[in-house]
Image (spheres, grey):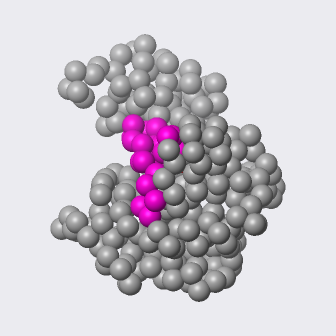
Amino acid sequence: MSGSQVVTPELRQWIIEQVQAGCQPAEVLASMRSSGWDEDVAIAALEHTLQQFTADPLRVPAQGLALPPAVRVPEPALAGSPSRLWAGDREVSVLVMLRNPPLVVLGGLLSDEECDALVAAAEPRLARSETVVLETGGNEINPSRTSRGMFFGRGETPLCQRIEARIAALVNWPVVNGEGLQVLHYRPGAEYKPHHDYFDPGQPGMAAVLRRGGQRVATLVMYLNTPQQGGGTTFPDLSLEVAPIKGNAVFFSYDRPHATTRTLHGGAPVISGEKWVATKWLREGEFI
Ligand code: PD2
Ligand code: ZN
């Protein structure tokens, strides 16, 4: 409980040492949260300690401590805690809802036939998944991501169009702000280690990525099959794991490209069976 947590001089010294060693304040906050510190107490301790620390002109400058500004994000109409949401052409169940970060687990977003059709269309086009290279903005194979995947162009097929329109209606965000659907396939042992989906704006290669519609502001992971064991979507900062169930999905948004959004997430290793997902990323503006 926050009432019993006391910020000692030793803790302040530890915070300063972490920052001097090159840790970002958000990383220090995440360490404090994972060792049991109440979030409000940890933020207050960080702010107070770093304000005092950076006020000393002989020490590190205060730059880099400010958060990027918050932006508007897509959001399903969850006011009044509905158990079902209208998604333009079908109703979807609300299975779990979190306010901070905004996260909702949805039941029945896709039909079995839609899941199977997406898998069938994607399978011949799969290649080892890549991630964005921060320095250049290009793509590369990354050992932390051992799935195979492919991208559909936005609106590439009538099925893509139907799903994109459904998502747009569900989260109140224009179709044109969406990237094309990405389909991923994981075999036993394959995983996607925890990461953020937003782009780090401080990295040089990001200017080119951000020109195509600005930041990512939300993610929808749709499960196209039900693996026998493993393959959940994990949220380490929330101690949450979403079970991959065919036709269901998890949606979450992040209003700034910063770890304080607590949207760190990963695809846990598949233990047995295989896993298929489709990911939809939503941008601030029109994705071109
Ligand atoms: O496959 C997943 O569960 C998963 C987990 C984390 C997918 C993504 N991230 C992604 O495509 O960004
Ligand atoms: Zn992700």
Q: Is residue 248 among the parts visible in the rendering?
A: yes
In the image, taking residue 99 as reference, residue 61 lies left or right, namely right
Q: Is residue 260 visible?
A: no
Residue 13 part of the magenta segment? no
The N terminus sits in image quarter: top left
* Residue 183 image offset from top left, x and y in percent: 63, 63
Name which residue lies at 37% across and 57% down: 105
Question: Is residue 211 depicted above or below 156 in this figure?
Answer: above
The spot of residue 169 in percent (x, y) is: 41, 80
In the image, residue 67 sits, relative to residue 71, either above or below, namely: above
Residue range corresponding to the magenta coloring = 229-248
Query: Residue at horizontal 56%, vertical 37%?
Result: 271
Q: x and y percent of residue 90 in the render?
A: 35, 80
Quarter location, residue 272: top right
Residue drawn at 62 percent across, 66 percent down: 119
Viewer-nearest residue: 120 or 154: 120
Drawn side of residue 10 relative to residue 276, left or right: left
Q: Nearer the viewer, residue 192 or 158?
A: 158
